[in-house]
Amino acid sequence: MKTHGFNVGIKESHLHNRGVFITKGVAPPGSVVAIYPGTVYHPGDSILLQSISNSYVFQCCDGVFIDGKHNGISGIFYKSIAGKNQLGPYSMCDHSWLTLKNLNNPLACGQIVNNGGPKNANVCYCEIDLDLRMVPLKQRKFIPNISHSEPSPLLRMVVLVARSNITEGEELLSSYFSVC
């Protein structure tokens, strides 16, 4: 899908099964190239069961966790919370990332970005708090995150930002320990 002069997509990777690639165009430095989707757990929220054998749990600097695993108990929790938080006909989040196909938000693939290590990383993680009061109800269906706790006006998200020009055919690579 096209996003601001470049497209991203999930493809086979020589590093680890699959990865996220620029499939068309060029992503310039500073561009948001992906979002780490999933259930957001705040300090004090129970995440023990979901975290067992789960390499998709992202820990933020302040102890917030985002569980980006699309299947198993993690996927079940995400769907359950999304259903509970639906407001009439309006979905409060994007479910499409759970299938890894036909993404409503083409950037909702950050959990698939592979580790390139500090020397090869061309993206970095950036933690943000999205003020949901500024997002119209009809647009929330594109947000691939949902809070495990009671809904709050601020939703933690982690976006992946290009550190350099990333060209067509190039895989997005992070350093799992880099937060900008």
Image (cartoon, rainbow, N blue to C red):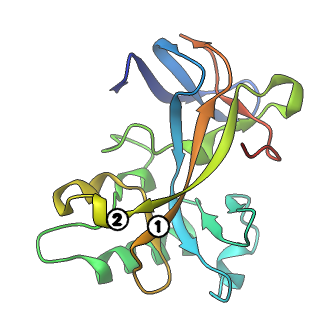
Q: Residue at x 59, y 76 (%)?
A: 41
| Residue 166 to residue 56: above or below | above
| Residue 107 to residue 88: above or below | above
- Cβ–Cβ under 8 Å for marks 1 and 2: yes
Image quadrant occupied by the N terminus: top left
Q: Residue furthest left?
A: 89
Q: Residue at x 44, y 39 (%)?
A: 107
114 on left or right of 95: right
137 on left or right of 111: left
Q: x and y percent of residue 94 in the render? A: 34, 57
Pointer 2 residue: 132
Q: Residue at x 64, y 27 (%)?
A: 172
- Whether residue 72 appears in this view of the structure is yes
Q: x and y percent of residue 49 in the render? A: 68, 83
| Residue 7 to residue 79: above or below | above
| Residue 10 to residue 99: above or below | above
Q: Secondary structure at mark 2?
A: helix
Pointer 1 residue: 155
Residue 125 figure quarter: top right
Q: x and y percent of residue 103 in the render? A: 35, 43
